[in-house]
Image (tube, grey):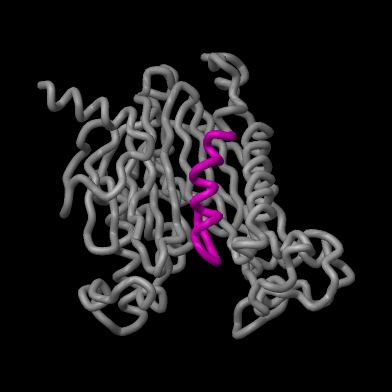
Amino acid sequence: MLRQLMRLLTSLWRPFGGRGGDAAGGGGGGDGVAGREGRDGLLWYRDLGRCAGGEFSMAVVQANQVLEDQSQIESGPFGTFVGVYDGHGGSDAARYVCDHLFSRFRGGLPTPPLVNSTLLLGVTSDGIRRAFLATEESFITLVSQLWNTQPDIATTGCCCLVGVICQRTLYVANLGDSRVVLGKKVGNTGEIAAISLSSEHNANVEAVRQELKAQHPNDPEIVVLKHGVWRIKGIIQVSRSIGDAYMKYAQYNREPINSKFRIPEPMNMPILTANPSITTHHLQPSDSFLIFASDGLWEHLSDQKAVEIVHSHPRAGSAKRLIKAALHEAARKREMRYSDLKRIDKKVRRHFHDDVTVIVIFLNHELMVKGSTQGPQLSVRSALDH
């Protein structure tokens, strides 16, 4: 009895849901609020846990030498906060966002929360936007402070996908090309439909290229096709991010950063932005679950395939199952077996797939109607600190 109580208290109050893993191998259902934690080689997971919005499954697999993906779930009186942070150029920006974005969001909420008010516990699109921009501002300040000793931090950035479930409203804020997909029941057919709820900011999207050209009408090379891939200034694919100071401020686009990041012509205005696209979705009883994932998943699985995998299997281990399905597909594309892919170590693994983060939220509409204050307090961050 005492051991169970201590385990529950630990899951409630441990700041980042534990580092380093407390259970190895495959898992079944949840273990307390935060769920059982485990590892399988370069794969870290929590099979099933509980949050204010319902239940969750969470997993990440590493491919880079240093894991560039970070993620978190926060649950409290405001509802449920989900963050997927896909770093590039290193892990600095993603780690910084994981350390600071939620606290910026929480700091903008009224104290105490306005329970059952028309303000939906104080959560607003403007409040989420302010949290993003404040995190960007403080990270750029850090870049300035470290410029003389660690200039490469100016070339690291982070795609940010955030979902906030507050009562029956889902807020989705996005920078970059991570994606959230809704699994929606189709009447009484037993089938499930996939609905993308996020806007992606990648130069391979025609609308994004047109947006960039409109913002930079005097730059004929604002987007360049290189080896079949559209890149902004021939360098980066995403048009929105936190960090990437070298693409926003001329003082960071010079020596001593690597020459491949330097733009020869004068930079008169920021090329990238940290202003997120934000949408709201009123959750319906037919809305079954949400899949939040970095682009490493969607590179190998379609939206519909992903929701069908979740829908047709038990909830426990859903995130891990999606990642393994993506890795099976990555192996198939290279005409190799999944078992062979698993034996490839980090860094070399990046030639076969990216870091992949997946968080699945199973929506509990009855709990959301009653109010988020009845849900569990929770703070979990992905592990795999290699």
Q: Who's the residue at 36% across and 63% down the image?
A: 62
Is residue 269 rendered to the left or right of residue 20?
Answer: right
Q: Is residue 233 above or below residue 249?
A: below
Residue that lies at the very extreme toward the left in this rendered image: 1
Residue 159, quarter of picture: bottom right
Residue 255 visible in the displayed image: yes
| Range shown magenta | 85-104
Quarter of the figure that contains the N terminus: top left
At x 70%, y 48%, the residue is 275
Most common secondary structure along the magenta stretch = helix
Q: Position of residue 220 (x, y in %)?
A: 83, 76
Does the stretch in magenta take in 74? no
Where residue 336 appears, as percent x and y from the top left, is: 27, 82
Determine the residue located farthest toward the right in the rendered image: 218
Q: Is residue 383 above or below residue 239?
A: above
Instruction: Measuring from the top left, give residue 257's x and y in whole percent.
Output: 66, 72
Quadrant position of residue 123: top right
**Is any part of residue 230 visible from this angle?**
no
In-front residue for pair 148/118: 148
Q: What number of labels is visible?
A: 0
At x 22% / y 59%, what residue is drawn?
A: 40
Task: Say whether residue 383 is left or right of residue 217.
Answer: left
Magenta-span inclusion, residue 90: yes
Quadrant of the frame with the C terminus: bottom left
Residue at image point 25% right, 38% down: 35
Residue 101 percent coordinates (x, y)? 56, 40
